[in-house]
Image: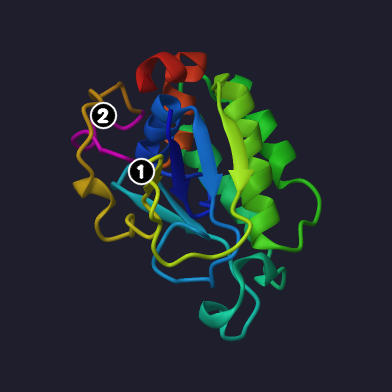
Amino acid sequence: MYSYLTENQFFAPISTFSAIAKSKNLLIEAHENYQKRGFRNRCIIDSPHGPLTMSIPLSKGKNEKMPVKEVTINFDTDWKRLHLQTIRTSYGSAAYFDHIYPEIEKLYDGHVKYLFDFNFKILNWLIEFMELECEIDCTTNYAKEIINDKIIDVRNHLKSKNYTDVDMTLQPYAQVFAENHSFLANLSIMDLIFCTGKASLTYLS
């Protein structure tokens, strides 16, 4: 059995959870420096006009050189309300919206200071909701290169510009805006659970 090593992503792409479902062991990088252009503070969901990015604003400063667990969320704007409104607009007609949206509202409730902690809160809920048999651990130190054949290192592989290039064998599923545009691959896991509910685990497996 191997571990899947990745950064702590915000409502991660489906490919991340597909890999988790197969590995059964998830290792979260907790000692890297924050890096831009990935999915640490953004996710991509469906919309009537195609892929739509939702981002979490971060406190001003040189986040890219800051330890990832020290990166703080900026609450100067009401981004949580905007996120929830966007989710309602995109998935209000999804098959499992009424079951899942109240749970996502709970995830957004409260004031979580650190991005890492907010993402980890979401990750734990997603694994519980999908009933993934998966153990989660965090790294205890940072290693640029992993020399261990039992660890699959995919840190920083996924970027907002290449997330659709991932080689996945997963088949298309019915998306909310199928009549507006063609199937959108490897969106946020949010898309899959709104569209397939608890069957998302069967789909990933």
Vertical relation: 49 (above or below) 144: above
201 vs 47, nearest the viewer? 201
Magenta-colored span: 176-186
Residue 91, image x, y percentages: 47, 33
Residue 5, image x, y percentages: 46, 47
176 vs 66, nearest the viewer? 66
Task: Please give the name of the residue rendered at 68% of the width and 52% of the height, measured from the top-left corner.
Answer: 118
Q: Which residue is mark 2?
A: 178
Mark 2 residue element: loop
Residue 149: numbered disc: 1
Image side of residue 22 versus residue 183, left or right = right
Vertical relation: 148 (above or below) 40: above
The type of residue carrying mark 2 is: Ala
Vertical relation: 74 (above or below) 21: below
54 vs 160, nearest the viewer? 160
Q: Quadrant of the C terminus?
A: top left
Residue 72, image x, y percentages: 69, 70
Q: Quadrant of the N terminus?
A: top left
